[in-house]
Image: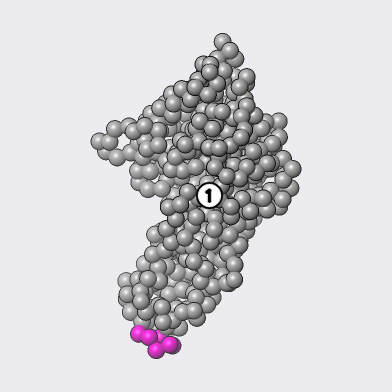
């Protein structure tokens, strides 16, 4: 890697993207972060592009990508994309098109984006400032600059593996003003490892600024939270969009791990759920959740249950239960079975990290196996039409796109849930896998998936 001294002389003209910062994208490990894209058939690409450009939804920082199955993925701005845009594309702009939201895990930057990256700008400005303070710029300092960060409005959250060299300590706090200025931010924070406590409090230090409150807008929903106290996952956007499209009108839901409202709000705002019981035991998340319900005008249709959901004083109320905890929500399964309506049953949405390694056999629910490659987006969505359509159970089949390890874990989870339902309600229930949905990949052999499981008392299914 060439030094920043040479970069200052050449002002980055003609330099490769490997010099002084790997990418202009704000992603992990120096690689472009995953971006949201809309997938359709090639013949509809131009119509989609024109619509996305007109509504200022097209992400011009990344190239359109042709997928292995022949479909085309058009990158979009995640915070601007709404469920109504997908409906318009599918029904009005290009009737008959697939129109599936997905994530590109290896997006290719556009030519314009490649010309001058924020990481390069950061390297140049920090090196100049450091040398102006009489400190010799070195390869060690250059290698210690951040290659990834998250942008939360005017606040940047740096990764834990940067600014670790001892020399930086003598340059604080003015150093953080220089970093923030180079990256176009006003506040700066740095994350550590998630605390091993039960509330998964993020270990975040505020480096510049007087508070950590930020706001995000996803699918027209406003989320406000304190980054030093609550976690926010950008990778869940496709699942939020899917939840927003579920047929929940008139239904009562229980969200056992509500957090700041990641899924509670889409269920209320877009899926038109009649009422949600939101369970959460992180007091900081509860404060944010209460504010977010008010911000989005749905506070009158939600009751917050603060505390350990295993002690929840609730039963026989739910048409659906969301179990959005990873790596496993298994501790909440008995509670989920108890809150389902005894006479009608309902649907469980069970989140899980599923893993696989060569030669490893299937483990009980909580650590199952998987592979590395994702199925094509239109295959992933192929079974969603059946999800929740209880009047047409004959069409409910396991999606052909799922990996064998996902299927084996889902079958094991289904068996366990059926046993719990029998124990909780004292009668036999029928369970059926509706759909398995991938959310994101954590590592080459670890995937976050969601199992949609229908649970009905046997007298309803003959």
Q: Where does the magenta region start and end?
A: 131-136
Tell me, yes or no, if residue 319 can be seen here. Answer: no
Location of the C terminus by quadrant is top right
- Residue 76 is situated, as x and y percent measured from the top left of the image, at 57, 51
Residue 133 in the magenta stretch? The answer is yes
Residue, far left:
359
Task: State the residue at coordinates (52%, 77%).
Answer: 177
x then y, percent, for residue 43: 55, 40
Decide if residue 157 is in sight here: yes
Residue 167 higher or lower than 34, as above or below = below
> What residue did someone put label 1 on?
36
Query: Label 1: few (<14), some or many (≥20) within 10 Å?
Result: many
**Residue 406 vs residue 343, the one in the foreground:** 343
Query: Which residue is at the front of the view, 209 or 122?
Result: 209
The picture places residue 18, in percent across and down from the top left corner, at 36, 67
Dominant SS type (magenta): loop
Judge from the rendering whether residue 365 lies leftward or rightward of residue 349; answer left or right: left
Label 1: state its secondary structure: strand
**Which residue is drawn at the image coordinates 37% and 79% (left, top)?**
167
């Amino acid at each position: 890697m060439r030094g920043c001294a040479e970069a200052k002389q050449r002002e980055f003209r003609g330099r490769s993207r490997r010099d002084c910062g790997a990418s202009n994208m704000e992603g992990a490990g120096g690689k472009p972060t995953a971006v949201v894209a809309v997938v359709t058939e090639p013949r509809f690409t131009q119509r989609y592009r024109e619509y996305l450009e007109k509504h200022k939804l097209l992400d011009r920082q990344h190239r359109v990508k042709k997928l292995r199955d022949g479909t085309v993925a058009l990158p979009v701005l995640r915070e601007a994309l709404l469920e109504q845009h997908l409906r318009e594309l599918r029904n009005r702009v290009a009737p008959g098109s697939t129109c599936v939201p997905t994530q590109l895990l290896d997006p290719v930057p556009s030519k314009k984006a490649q010309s001058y990256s924020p990481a390069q700008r950061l390297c140049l400005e920090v090196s100049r400032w450091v040398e102006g303070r009489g400190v010799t710029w070195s390869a060690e300092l250059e290698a210690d600059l951040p290659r990834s960060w998250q942008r939360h409005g005017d606040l940047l959250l740096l990764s834990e593996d940067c600014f670790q060299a001892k020399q930086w300590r003598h340059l604080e706090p003015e150093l953080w003003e220089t970093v923030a200025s180079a990256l176009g931010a006003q506040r700066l924070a740095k994350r550590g490892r998630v605390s091993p406590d039960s509330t998964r409090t993020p270990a975040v230090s505020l480096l510049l600024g007087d508070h950590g409150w930020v706001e995000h807008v996803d699918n027209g929903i406003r989320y406000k939270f304190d980054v030093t106290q609550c976690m926010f996952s950008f990778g869940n956007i496709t699942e939020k969009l899917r939840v927003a499209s579920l047929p929940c009108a008139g239904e009562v839901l229980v969200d056992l791990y509500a957090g700041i409202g990641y899924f509670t709000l889409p269920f209320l705002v877009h899926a038109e759920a009649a009422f949600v019981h939101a369970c959460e035991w992180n007091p900081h998340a509860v404060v944010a959740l209460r504010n977010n319900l008010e911000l989005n005008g749905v506070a009158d249709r939600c009751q917050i249950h603060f505390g350990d959901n295993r002690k929840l004083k609730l039963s026989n109320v739910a048409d659906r239960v969301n179990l959005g905890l990873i790596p496993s929500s298994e501790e909440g399964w008995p509670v989920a079975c108890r809150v389902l309506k005894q006479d009608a049953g309902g649907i469980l949405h069970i989140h899980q990290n599923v893993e696989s390694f060569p030669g490893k056999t299937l483990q009980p629910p909580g650590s199952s196996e998987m592979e590395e490659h994702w199925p094509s987006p239109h295959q992933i969505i192929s079974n969603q039409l059946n999800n929740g359509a209880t009047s047409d159970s004959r069409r409910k089949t396991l999606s052909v796109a799922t990996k064998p390890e996902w299927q084996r874990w889902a079958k094991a989870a289904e068996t366990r849930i059926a046993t719990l339902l029998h124990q909780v309600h004292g009668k036999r229930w029928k369970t059926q896998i509706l759909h398995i949905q991938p959310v994101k990949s954590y590592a080459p052999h670890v995937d976050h998936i969601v199992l949609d499981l229908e649970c009905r008392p046997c007298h309803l299914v003959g």
